[in-house]
Image: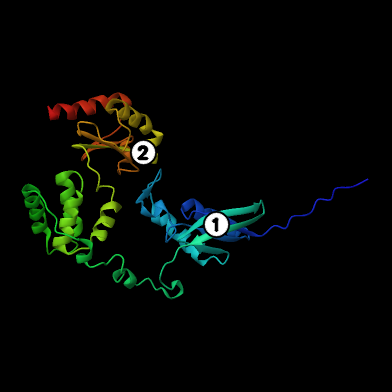
Amino acid sequence: MKTAVMKKQKVTGAALVVGGGIGGIQAALDLAESGFKVYLLDKKPSIGGVMAQLDKTFPTNDCSMCILAPKLVSVARHPNIEVITNSDLEEIAGESGNFLVTIHKKPRYVDVDKCTGCGLCMQNCPVQQIPYEDTVQERVVLSDSDRETIQKIINEYEGQQGVLMPVLQAINRKYNYLPADLLKYVSEHLHIPLNLIFSVATFYRALSLQKRGVHVIRVCLGTACHVRGARRVLEEFERILGIPAGQNTNDMLFTLETVNCVGACALAPVVLVDDTYYGHMAPKKVQRVIDHYQKEKE
């Protein structure tokens, strides 16, 4: 008679947490406090996630950094937590309790152990600080009206500190997006690298590189709006306009977008049309809002 003997599996007392947002940070702290060696992995250069970009949190309106900052300090100081940033998870092999993980760590081009956070490497980065002559290969040809408009904007802000942002905002207000030729003209005349202009233009949601309609409809899908039916409001806009979120209507009158928060949680669900807020929205109110702007056009 043969007896099956179960071989006891060797379990490694370590854990990998993928994602350095607030959830990943808390999971890493809980595991570390339980005695595990924790590797906290994030593809971005630093941990904190989206919460680090917020002003307040739902539903208490507490300061997000007041909640997040102590946890960031705890992670940095905890002897059982090793933070691995600027890295991607490539492969997981093995079985429960005994995994082998392959991580691709992207180069930083600086010695992390010697980094003091002074920022000099960013100021002298050969990628971001390309001389403007190398970014604009030939002079930009604009129509007379566009040239007059853009030159007027540049003249208004030229010489001011931080001139790029107000110039981009002014162009965005005038054209409702940022035409590529105008950005090249700005690069040429303000002597700002074109790649730096595009990095700023793509960072802010208020700026757009894609052509947009006369009126931009933004449906808030933040937590407060979501729990009060914002998704149904969005679906009604999509049904009436005949376009999904992120698209323009055929007559270029409307652009439909979604945003994570418009800072008016007390009015949830909220829809923002250009600079006008529509609070306590409901699907039955959508047609009325659209009719208002269609009558304006007529």
Q: In the rendered view, does 202 fall on the left or right side of 76?
A: left
| Quadrant showing the N terminus | top right
Residue 278 percent location from the top left of the image: 25, 34
Q: Amino acid at mark 1?
A: Ala
Q: Position of residue 196 (x, y in %)?
A: 26, 60
196, above or below 298, in the image: below
**First of labels 1, 2 by sequence position:** 1
Q: Write down the residue under mark 1.
A: 28
**Residue type at tag 2:** Leu
Residue drawn 8% across and 50% down? Answer: 149
Are the residues at dot 1 and dot 2 in contact (C-beta closer than 8 Å)?
A: no
Residue depicted at 12% across the width and 59% down the height: 157
Looking at the picture, tell me which residue is in the foreground, 100 or 229: 100
Q: Residues within 10 Å of mark 1 (few under 14, many from 20)?
A: many
Q: Residue furthest bottom?
A: 114
The furthest residue to the front: 138
To which residue does mark 2 refer? 221
Give the class, few, some or many, for how many residues have Cα within 10 Å of label 2's Cα (few <14, many ≥20).
many
Q: Nearer the viewer, residue 273 or 188?
A: 188
Residue 243 on image: x %, y %: 30, 31
The image's colouring method is rainbow
Q: How many numbered marks, from 0 up?
A: 2
Quadrant the C terminus occupies:
top left
Q: Is residue 282 visible?
A: no
